[in-house]
Image: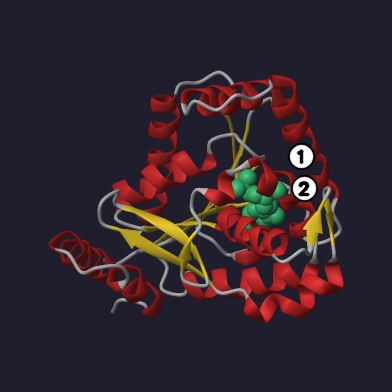
Amino acid sequence: MIPKFCETLAESGKPSPISFIFVAEMKKEMEKPNRIIIAIDGHSGCGKSTVAKELAKRLGYIYIDTGAMYRTVTLFALRNGLAADKKVDEPGLIARMGEVNIEFRFNPKTLQNETYLNGENVEEEIRQLPVANHVSPVATIKEVRAAMVKLQQKMGENKGIVMDGRDIGTVVFPNAELKIFMTASPEVRAQRRYDELTEKGQTVDFNEILQNVMERDRIDSSRAASPLKQADDALLLDNSHISREEQFRWVLEKAEKRIGK
Ligand code: DC
């Protein structure tokens, strides 16, 4: 059975032959036994989403980017005058959380899920610096976290999911069958981000990016609500000095072992 939110993913946008194929493929996959939950946590900018996306694609699982959810709440706060100068009006945002509707919709052209805020595609905007500069304080708010965790648990209720974030293996799915904790040095992560943005034609300052990476690490690891930490039963993957291919082989091998292939 296809979970409700997948139907929304597939049915959103204009129906196309590709989205029907996607639904049919997903349905086949969902009927396979031994579907598991794969939780990928770790520091900002160490490539969690790349690994998670590739893994989900290979296994025929659903990929959920939970960072995108916190980014979307942050965008809502910025647009409504509830965040500015790296400060957030916490009571104001908590009071208006009911107005935040987050969805992932499947884009048949890119074959990727994209993030929507109240029906508007915000996938690009949530990746920009204003959101990056305000997302950590938003993610420290316990009421915001409770709402996101609830939504994430619903998305994973049928298993067959790869979810990446900071608290997936510790809070969202403490019983996930496979937990991976990813990291890389701050300099390596800042360099990768710098290369990615300059390739897109943006003019950015390396030091500003490095500061942003280190500041996010500090806030993510020291906040009171669900701080970033490696779950006791998570496997550690430091990818500072390994290639994307090596990393993917490693992750796939662990996943297949847990699935029992
Ligand atoms: O993965 P990302 O960089 O897109 O995450 C954006 C921010 O959201 C980051 O500061 C950490 C926070 N986050 C979180 O607190 N819990 C999650 N499960 C995912 C992200």
Mark 1, secondary structure of its residue: helix
Question: Residue 256 location in percent, x, y?
Answer: 36, 47
Q: Residue 63 sits in which quadrant?
A: bottom left
Q: Residue at x 64, y 25 (%)?
A: 204
Q: Nearer the viewer, residue 8 or 163?
A: 8
Residue that sits furthest to the top in the current view = 241
Q: Which residue is mark 1?
A: 217
Q: Is residue 41 visible?
A: no
Distance of label 1 from label 2 (alpha carbons): 5 Å
Q: Are marks 1 and 2 in contact (CB under 8 Å)?
A: yes
Which residue is at a point 45% across and 30% down the rendered structure image?
A: 247
**What amino acid is found at the position of numbered circle 2 in the picture?**
Asp
Residue 12 shows in this picture: yes
* Residue annotated with mark 2: 220
In the rendered image, residue 212, in percent from the top left (x then y), is placed at: 75, 34
Q: Please name the colour scheme applied to the rendered image.
A: secondary structure
Q: Is residue 188 left or right of residue 255?
A: right
Instruction: Name the image quarter holding the N terminus.
Output: bottom left
